[in-house]
Amino acid sequence: MAVWLQRELVLPPRPRGFHLVTDEVLAQVPEVRSLRVGVVHIFIRHTSAALTLNENASADVRRDFAAWFDRAVPDGAPYFSHTLEGPDDMPAHVKASLLGSAVSFPVAEGRPLLGTWQGIYLCEFRERGGPRRLVVTVFGE
């Protein structure tokens, strides 16, 4: 029998950076463990943070991502006109657009079929982004 589940999760505030949240997210959706086959879709309800799947073993990767994004889209650049919410707001919108607002992955026999070195990142682009809301949709049997 097919199962549809949708749940909103709230992640606590984090500092700017790339944060692994795989275990935290999956712990809040234990139904994934009961799927024989399925798909998990995770959507972030914010325009100044993003989600991505990437290397989960080396903290250097997360630091290198942060360094590249901060250099490519700097805070307070003089060409931004949307500045009412601070110098990190418009750059956060651009960075979030580059990475995207959702990730999806397959599930088999109750396990996410992520690659050996893949994890779910919350990409926080604001200095004080606050709690982040995710909508997790699960379909499977």
Image (spheres, rainbow, N blue to C red):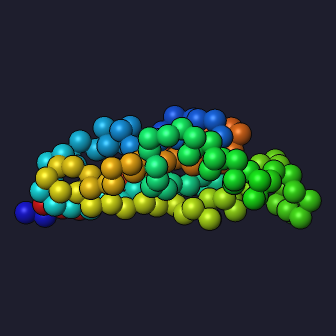
Which part of the image, by quadrant, shows the C terminus? bottom left
The spot of residue 7 in percent (x, y) is 34, 50
The spot of residue 90 in percent (x, y) is 76, 57
Foreground residue among 61 and 47: 61
- Tell me which residue sits at (85%, 62%) in the image: 80
Total number of numbered discs in the rendering = 0
Q: In screen coordinates, is 104 left or right of 77? A: left
- Which residue is outermost to the left? 1
Q: In screen coordinates, is 59 left or right of 97? A: left
Q: In screen coordinates, is 90 left or right of 97? A: right
Foreground residue among 116 and 133: 116
- Tell me which residue sits at (44%, 44%) in the image: 56
Kindly indicate the quadrant of the structure image that contains residue 50. Answer: bottom right
- Tell me which residue sits at (33%, 54%) in the image: 115
The spot of residue 114 in percent (x, y) is 32, 54
Foreground residue among 9 and 90: 90
- Tell me which residue sits at (13%, 64%) in the image: 2
Kindly indicate the quadrant of the structure image that contains residue 83. Answer: bottom right
Residue 10 shows up from this direction: no
Residue 80 shows up from this direction: yes
The spot of residue 54 in percent (x, y) is 46, 53
